[in-house]
Image: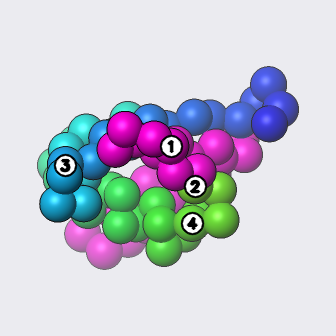
């Protein structure tokens, strides 16, 4: 991880659905944002204990993933 990386924290419910996630665009559910991040940057995800996880994304990657929501709107 470099100092330019962005960390997005994720919290899961016991059934595996996403309850909280950082850097979520307005109008997008937590599960939708997690699904899109997984599709676009799944290799940057690290599962943690206690129903948590984190995406460690290179600089600019969050903005490029957010832009995919604008393209589909």
Front-most of 73 and 34? 34
Q: Is residue 37 left or right of residue 3?
A: left
Tell me which label, 3 or 2, sits earlier in the chain. 3
Q: Secondary structure at mark 1?
A: strand
Rendered location of residue 26, percent (x, y): 22, 42
Q: CA distance from mark 2 to mark 4?
A: 5 Å
Q: Is residue 49 left or right of residue 51?
A: right
Front-most of 47 and 31? 47
Q: What residue range appears in magenta?
A: 46-73
Q: Secondary structure at mark 2?
A: strand
Q: Is residue 14 visible?
A: yes
Residue at the right extreme, as displayed: 2
Rendered location of residue 50, percent (x, y): 37, 38
Q: Is residue 29 left or right of residue 60?
A: left
- Label 3: which residue? 13
Q: Which residue corresponds to the image point at 83% horizontal and 32% vertical from the top-left?
A: 2
Tell me which label, 1 or 3, sits earlier in the chain. 3
Cβ–Cβ under 8 Å for marks 1 and 3? no
When asked about the image quadrant of residue 23, the answer is top left
Cβ–Cβ under 8 Å for marks 3 and 2? no
| Residue 49 is a magenta residue | yes
Q: Which residue corresponds to the image point at 80% horizontal and 36% vertical from the top-left?
A: 1
Front-most of 2 and 49? 49
Where residue 48 is drawn, which disc sits there? Answer: 1
- Relative to 55, residue 9 above or below: above
- Label 4: which residue? 42
- Label 2: which residue? 45
Q: CA distance from mark 4 to mark 3?
A: 19 Å
User: Marks 4 and 1: which is nearer the front?
Assistant: 1
User: Marks 1 and 2: which is nearer the front?
Assistant: 1
Q: Which residue corresponds to the image point at 19% horizontal and 52% vertical from the top-left?
A: 14
User: Marks 4 and 3: which is nearer the front?
Assistant: 3
């Amino acid at each position: 991880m470099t100092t330019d990386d962005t960390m997005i924290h994720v919290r899961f419910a016991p059934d595996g659905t996403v309850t909280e996630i950082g850097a979520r665009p307005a109008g997008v559910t937590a599960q939708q944002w997690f699904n899109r991040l997984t599709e676009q940057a799944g290799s940057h995800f690290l599962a943690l204990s206690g129903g948590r996880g984190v995406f460690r994304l290179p600089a600019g990657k969050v903005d490029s993933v957010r832009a995919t929501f604008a393209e589909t709107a």
